[in-house]
Amino acid sequence: MRWITFGHVEADECGAVNEFLAEAQHAEVAHNTLGCLVTLHDLVSRPPRLMGGGERLDIGGHEVRHVVRNINTPHVPHNWEARLLFEEHTRTLFCGDLFTHLGNGPAVTGDNLVELCLEAEELFRQISCLTAMTATLRSLAELRPATLAVMHGSSFNGDCPRALNDLADALDSRFGPEAAFVSRPSVLAGPHPGSA
């Protein structure tokens, strides 16, 4: 193992990072500059490799060299240091928590994930800034990914640009304006503090 990387700094993304580093003596953590400066310099047992916005990292390969591009996505879907990776040869967008959904689906699907993602958002309220989210989704569609590698749920292999734009439209439609969405209680959080 040479590289360890993840979308943002949360226990489910990187909670075992130091155990991986202990086993893989030559491995390095690679993350965006903000994540390294704010958290990872203090969290990981070896100095991380800082990646600037748009910076590429050659992760090797036998017949084909695989290169991932760092795409900074602050607050999308959440956390200031959030970022995604885009593998350029396979055109795979490593989505982190984008398109999170529940259930035991197949590893990869061609089925539309948008409604499942909206149901999860209704429950978890994981998106920290809806306007940043929708703008970022639309810009990610311009990459024309072939696969969306989803962390929580089935990955998607199909018309990925359309899926990204459809999710942006659906979030705008269902949860905008944000003030109205925030005022509705979350099932997990319980009643809103101002409700009777």
Image (cartoon, helix red, strand yellow):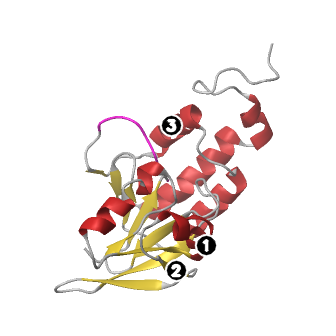
Q: How many marks?
A: 3
Disc 3 marks a residue whose amino acid type is Ala
Question: In the image, is 105 to the left or to the right of 85?
Answer: left
Q: Disc 2 on helix, strand or loop?
A: strand
Range of the magenta residues? 98-104
The residue furthest top is 196
Picture coordinates of residue 148 (x, y %)? 39, 60
Assign the magenta stretch its main secondary structure.
Answer: loop
Quarter where residue 44 is shown: bottom left
The residue where tag 2 is placed is 50
Q: Earlier in the sequence, mark 3 or mark 2?
A: 2
How crowded pointer 1 is (Cα within 10 Å; few <14, some 14-19, many 20+) is rated as some
Q: Earlier in the sequence, mark 2 or mark 1?
A: 1
Q: Which mark is residue 123?
A: none
How crowded pointer 3 is (Cα within 10 Å; few <14, some 14-19, many 20+) is rated as some
Which is in the foreground here, disc 1 or disc 3? 1
Residues at discs 2 and 1 in contact (Cβ within 8 Å) = yes
Q: Nearer the viewer, residue 131 or 70?
A: 70
Question: Does 103 lie within the magenta span?
Answer: yes
The residue where tag 1 is placed is 37
> As displayed, is residue 3 above or below residue 109?
below
Residues at discs 3 and 2 in contact (Cβ within 8 Å) = no
The alpha-carbon separation of the residues under discs 1 and 3 comes to: 31 Å
